[in-house]
Image (spheres, rainbow, N blue to C red):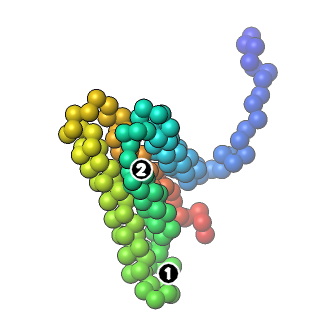
Amino acid sequence: MNCFENVTMPSCVWFESGEKRNIVASIIAGLLFFSGWWFIIDAATVPEVANRLPSAAHVCGVMATLSLIMINSVSNAQVRGETYTGGCMGPRGARLWLFLGFVVGFASLIAAVWILFANYVNRSKDQTYPGVCLFMQNALIFAGSLVFKFGRTEDLWG
């Protein structure tokens, strides 16, 4: 007889729905976003590493976060033109907003790669950790943005 047969764990009420795709995609996207900011916070708080990280490099992470908000503020139905017909530009404006969100996201990722190679790899510094952290921050935030946008379904929203 096993000693754990009589032990019962309470179930998670928020995870008991039949369709778990939206929940899992939201959790994964949140973990990616958190991990991205954790990398740059780690690089900015270690004294010997923080001196090598320029303050202007944090703009890349802020722009990646803005990109996440821009991309996920437009639903797929609005982009297809099924639900959004009002406003000054209609579905065209929703598509333009989504496009600009992707442009900002890719620009922040490209800027992070540029800073990594220009300031840390090509100058053959002994420590490339701040540049790698900056790249990881932007890559993980952008990946979280994509998971949150395309990993969920909108059928359950009504």
Residue 87 vertical position relative to residue 123 in the rendered view, above or below: below
> Which amino acid type corresponds to the residue marked 2 in the rendered image?
Ser
- Count up the numbered dots: 2
Give the x, y percent position of residue 90. 44, 84
Question: Which residue position holds label 1?
Answer: 84
Residue 31 vertical position relative to residue 97 in the rendered view, above or below: above
Residue 12 vertical position relative to residue 21 in the rendered view, above or below: above
| Viewer can see residue 134 | yes
| Viewer can see residue 149 | no
Between 134 and 67, the residue placed more toward the observer is 134
For the view shown, which residue lies furthest in the left direction? 122
Between 18 and 77, the residue placed more toward the observer is 77
Q: Are marks 1 and 2 in contact (CB under 8 Å)?
A: no
Element type at mark 2: helix
Between 1 and 14, the residue placed more toward the observer is 14
Looking at the figure, which quarter contains the C terminus?
bottom right
Q: Residue at x 42, y 86 (%)?
A: 89
Marks 1 and 2, how far apart at CA: 40 Å
Question: Which residue position holds label 2?
Answer: 55
Closer mark to the observer between disc 1 and disc 2: 2
Instruction: First in sequence, mark 1 or 2: give its number.
Output: 2
> Which amino acid type corresponds to the residue marked 1 in the rendered image?
Tyr
Q: Residue at x 36, y 70 (%)?
A: 99
Q: Residue at x 41, y 56 (%)?
A: 59
Give the x, y percent position of residue 85. 48, 85
